[in-house]
Image (cartoon, grey):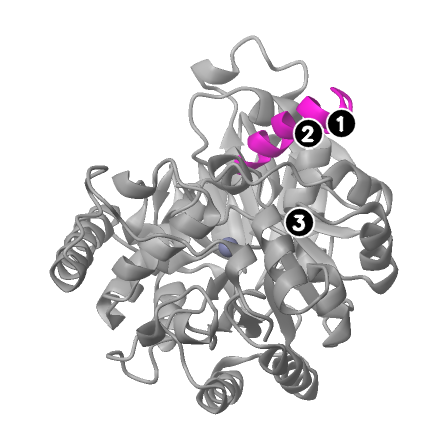
């Protein structure tokens, strides 16, 4: 048994059921749970103490959507100004050069940024399995998460509908459906831990309605329910997707998902920019979760998801940084700020207060990913705790409301400490368990490798905006499946 005392936080924002804020707060952690929280706790000794003087302490945030493998292909000049479909068809050509080592280092890069910016639990949506990679490619992500110390619920993703079957991805990065399901079963058996505070859980995630078949969606949900794991996919991200689904399936994206058994509190969708009011009500009634990804939706010009309406309907809504190549950062606290600002444009200035955006990132995300004991600071909750020093120039003059200050203000989104499952993983704004510069060097090495390999294979220089790239088919040209 190990103990940890977090002492004398200027303010603890608990995000518990009554949204308590406690000044001069101590938190005592036994193993991986909070054992006591309050002022002047009578704790004689602890194995480890963190001095949180001058800090805002709050629950670690939960990231509900990401593609960590894309971290090596951020900010690619050819797609800096592309919408989703052309963005995808060009990047697929670089992603086809992925290797196990590239996946390992890209995962560490994204997870490192997430930890540094206040995220303590993340999912990942990994769906790209090039022909040349070994069958156990997915396992690199688990190895990376264990090394860096984050709580992780990666999804075994999939793509089965290549260009030759009316899908978007090149055939060399899609897999046969029986092979996909076989590997889904393998990773569940190898890694999924049903414990409510498990450090590793597995979910299943066909990529999107335009890269898999309806059969694969149905079979994946059946397998997930057999093993009691969750299911995830992209949904209603763009108007192109609406048009594609109407053309190919004769249904709107949400109707398609309903028809293949994809609603319920064990399902969550990324984006949902184009859900209508009726679909929002149906998502709320079934407990179907939504990961809102504001930066990605702005970056690709996809649209503004109706999040205030979803929250009013008591939908399960969390935040996702999404990317890494459509954000192009894994900045969790930055995503909270984007969320707060974006909705004011369409739904009014009072539609997304700072505390509401933080609630989505903490309690909301924990609900979406199925962690009942995370996203809040209270006795018995999981010990995922972050501290942000308020003694910084960026917060000067803003301390009349320290909780809102970390969303409205600040010159950096780096947290001062982070504890995951009772273990300190960020200290003084630096990762504890890995050398950040080693990750940086390896990430750049593998990024360059992939760019060179793609150029050799396709003759197209993705680092240039000049000359023709790859054209996205327009949805109207698709044939019905
Ligand atoms: Zn995504």
Q: Nearer the viewer, mark 3 or mark 1?
A: 1
Q: Residue at x 84, y 48 (%)?
A: 314
Q: Nearer the viewer, mark 2 or mark 3?
A: 2
From which residue to which does the magenta span run? 335-353
Q: Is residue 143 magenta?
A: no
Q: In the picture shown, does residue 135 fall above or below 318?
A: below
Residue 478 image offset from top left, x and y in percent: 53, 64
Q: In the picture shown, does residue 98 fall above or below 327?
A: below
**Tag of residue 318:** 3
Q: Nearer the viewer, residue 130 or 418?
A: 130
Marks 2 & 1, CB-CB < 8 Å contact? yes
Q: Is residue 42 visible?
A: no
Q: Nearer the viewer, residue 167 or 388?
A: 167
Q: Which residue is mark 1?
A: 347
Of helix, strand and loop, which one carries label 2?
A: helix
Q: Nearer the viewer, residue 151 or 338?
A: 338
Q: Is residue 369 left or right of residue 411?
A: right
How busy is the neighbourhood of tag 2: few (under 14 within 10 Å), some, or many (20 plus)? many
Of helix, strand and loop, which one carries label 1?
A: helix
**Tag of residue 343:** 2
Queried on whether the Cβ of the residue with tag 2 lies below 8 angstroms from ligand 1, the answer reads: no
Q: Earlier in the sequence, mark 3 or mark 1?
A: 3
Specify the quadrant that holds the C terminus: bottom right
Queried on whether the Cβ of the residue with tag 3 lies below 8 angstroms from ligand 1, the answer reads: no
Specify the quadrant that holds the N terminus: bottom right
How far apart are labels 2 and 1 at the CA level?
Answer: 6 Å
Residue 295 image offset from top left, x and y in percent: 52, 37
Q: Quadrant of residue 397?
A: top right
């Amino acid at each position: 048994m190990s103990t940890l005392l977090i002492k004398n936080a200027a303010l603890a924002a608990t995000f518990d059921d009554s949204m308590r804020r406690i000044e001069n707060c101590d938190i005592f952690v036994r193993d991986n749970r909070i054992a006591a929280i309050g002022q002047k706790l009578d704790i004689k000794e602890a194995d480890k103490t963190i001095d949180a003087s001058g800090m805002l302490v709050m629950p670690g945030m939960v990231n509900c959507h990401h593609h960590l493998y894309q971290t090596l292909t951020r900010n690619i000049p050819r797609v800096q100004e592309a919408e989703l479909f052309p963005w995808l068809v060009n990047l697929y050509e670089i992603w086809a050069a992925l290797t196990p080592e590239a996946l390992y280092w890209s995962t560490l890069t994204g997870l490192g940024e997430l930890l540094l910016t206040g995220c303590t639990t993340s999912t990942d949506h990994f769906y790209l399995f090039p022909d040349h990679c070994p069958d156990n490619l997915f396992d690199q992500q688990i190895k990376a998460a264990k090394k860096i110390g984050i709580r992780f619920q990666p999804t075994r993703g999939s793509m089965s509908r290549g260009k030759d079957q009316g899908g978007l991805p090149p055939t060399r990065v899609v897999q046969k459906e029986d092979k996909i399901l076989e590997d889904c079963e393998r990773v569940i058996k190898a890694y999924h831990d049903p414990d409510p505070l498990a450090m590793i859980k597995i979910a299943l995630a066909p990529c999107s309605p335009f890269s898999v078949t309806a059969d694969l969606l149905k079979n994946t949900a059946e397998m997930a329910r057999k093993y009691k794991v969750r299911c995830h996919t992209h949904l209603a991200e763009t108007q192109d997707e609406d048009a594609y689904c109407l053309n190919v399936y004769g249904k709107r994206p949400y109707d398609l998902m309903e028809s293949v058994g994809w609603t319920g509190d064990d399902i969550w969708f990324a984006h949902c920019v184009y859900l209508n009011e009726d679909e929002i009500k149906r998502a709320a009634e079934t407990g179907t979760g939504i990961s809102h990804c504001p930066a990605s939706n702005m970056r690709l010009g996809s649209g503004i998801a109706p999040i205030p309406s979803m929250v009013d309907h008591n939908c399960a809504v969390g935040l996702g940084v999404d990317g890494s190549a459509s954000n192009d950062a894994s900045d969790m606290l930055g995503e909270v700020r984007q969320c707060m600002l974006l909705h004011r444009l369409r739904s009014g200035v009072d539609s997304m207060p700072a505390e509401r955006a933080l609630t989505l990132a903490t309690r909301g995300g924990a609900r979406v990913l199925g962690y009942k004991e995370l996203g809040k600071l209270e006795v018995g909750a999981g010990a995922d705790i972050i501290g942000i020093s308020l003694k910084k120039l960026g917060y000067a003059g803003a301390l009349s409301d320290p909780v809102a200050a970390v969303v409205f203000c600040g010159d950096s989104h780096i947290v001062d400490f982070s504890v995951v499952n009772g273990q300190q993983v960020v200290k003084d704004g630096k990762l504890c368990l890995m050398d950040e510069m080693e990750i940086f060097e390896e990430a750049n090495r593998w990024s360059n490798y992939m760019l060179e390999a793609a150029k050799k294979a396709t003759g197209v220089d993705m680092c240039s905006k000049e000359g023709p790239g790859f054209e996205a088919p327009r949805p109207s040209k698709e044939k019905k499946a």
